[in-house]
Amino acid sequence: MTQSRSNSLMHSPEILAAAQESKAWPFEEARKIIKRYEGKDWPEAILFETGYGPSGLPHIGTFGEVARTTMVRHAFRLLTEDKVPTRLLCFSDDMDGMRKIPDNVPDRSFLEPHLHKPLTVVPNPFGGDHDSFGHHNNAMLRRFLDTFGFDYEFASATEYYKAGRFDAILKRVAERYDAIMAIMLPTLGEERRATYSPFLPISPKTGRVLYVPMKKVDAEAGTITFDDEEGEETTLPVTGGKVKLQWKPDFGARWAALGVDFEMFGKDHGPNMGVYDRICEALGGRAPEHFVYELFLDDKGEKISKSKGNGLTIDEWLTYAPTESLALYMFQKPRTAKKLYFDVIPRAVDEYYQFLAAYPKQAWKERLGNPVWHIHDGNPPETVLPVSFALLLNLVSASNAHDKSVLWGFISRHVDGVTPQTHPELDRLVVYAIRYFDDFVKPTKVFRAADEIEAAALQALSARLATLPGDADGEAIQNASLDVARGIERYQDHSKKSPEGGPGVSVAFFQMIYQVLIGQERGPRFGSFAALYGIDNTRALIDKALRGELAA
């Protein structure tokens, strides 16, 4: 997802025409930016921005903002034939005060004396070479973004404030103080209105970020006067990192100061979007184009949070699946709330490879709507995956394999010409499958014994499999299994018809197979699984189940 790759087809008339009509959401957002400058000169560069609050460790939602913004940026580059320079600025609000201690730090008591200090002043509870908690969390974010290959610039609020890069806009806030207050006060409760100020001074005594009312704002001198924690009247310049802005004014002021053209944010910011815009405009800027995405939820349906540490971390996803599957999850339905926990990983992996397999057969209109075009900046790799991730997981489950050589023994025997050397992508997935199975599938496996009808069905299935050649493919095995089920009343589905005109087969038949043989509620297509595992091995597994060795 970088801008460094070249694509000779990128600006062909055929692709450009398809892009102009594409309904994929990155193209729709890119067209808004183009319309923004209709009839006007382009700026020196179109500025895309993402924000990060380093009050806790970066989570996947943070990564998602950068991935999605990169997709819009790439769509914009195609639509403008790469004639307009673009920048992606990842901005960290690391000068914010630490208002509460995150749940997922090693020693909460270590941080208690530093509450309300800027995050880049709070000591690093994780140890190591980073100067502060904020620096540590910034490094965590940058490490992943660099690993993934994003083309971005990192910006620290602390550095921008202290280096004077916001001095001009801070003076303008002082000059237009009344206008800013007129925007903010109606959005606040009565008690907050009485003490509110867009300026948050940094205490010269304690280093804490102070939420105090202003006694005087001197626009000409560029200073604010307030009473500090001890009630002592204090005057500070608004420049040089002596103060920062409250978060809502900070949004609008940053947009005005930097000339941001596009920023996306989560649904929780949606109600404040108009406030950010009006502050930006009051300070002489033009509000950027927005994209509001839905929030990620944990397995209980609660919003994931950096401070709580619920949901998945970046490193956790990448322990069990390739980065491309994570990018796919970010691309799909960004305006729909999605659960983000371990159970979503296998499906995301298989869907990524399905989209990748479909890409070469598609016309450009479909290609530009295919997630892999956006994930790979228009250059999806040519990858053939002969075995799905779901199938690998079930193969691990049935074989109890803890070493990839065991899995490759099954794969190489039953899929002609496939080895770790010829299919390195599959080799990568084999490792992920073993890890995922050991950590998430194995602990939840619950085998059950077959009842009398189920035992007879499994005996009939084993006998039918014995009539097939050892190298029978998945389709032949699946059809043989269906033939067995059609003759058993429990598994007949009279809402379906068999090829011979009789009843079809209920899904309960294959559910029973996976519950009894694999210890799971569901699995991939049984014929594909048995072909990969081998007919003899499958029959041996049935024998073990019927002897009561699996459910013991």
Image (spheres, rainbow, N blue to C red):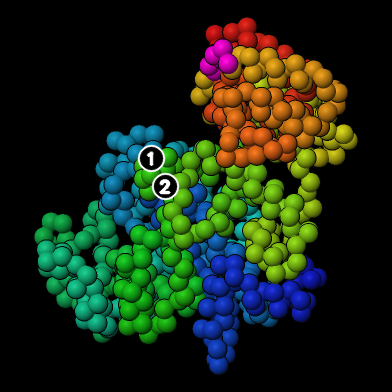
Q: In the rendered structure, which amino acid carries the disc numbered 2?
A: Leu
| The image quarter in which residue 217 lies | bottom left
Residue topped by disc 2:
297
Q: In this view, does 467 lie above or below 125?
A: above
Q: Is residue 79 above or below residue 196?
A: below
Query: The N terminus is located in which quarter?
Result: bottom right
**Residue drawn at (27%, 83%) of the image:** 175
Find the distance from the CA under tag 1 to the CA under tag 2. Answer: 7 Å
Residue 31 drawn at (x, y percent): 57, 78
Q: Is residue 214 above or below residue 41?
A: above
Kindly state the secondary structure of the residue where label 1 is placed: loop
- In the displayed orientation, state which residue is furthest to the right: 417
Residue topped by disc 1:
300
Q: Please tell me the numbered disc located at residue 132.
A: none
Residue 251 drawn at (x, y percent): 37, 69
**Labels 1 and 2 touching (C-beta < 8 A):** yes
Residue 209 drawn at (x, y percent): 27, 58
**Residue drawn at (66%, 28%) of the image:** 486
Q: In the rendered structure, which amino acid carries the disc numbered 1?
A: Lys
**Residue drawn at (39%, 67%) of the image:** 161
Kindly state the secondary structure of the residue where label 2 is placed: strand
Q: Give the range drawn in magenta.
A: 447-453
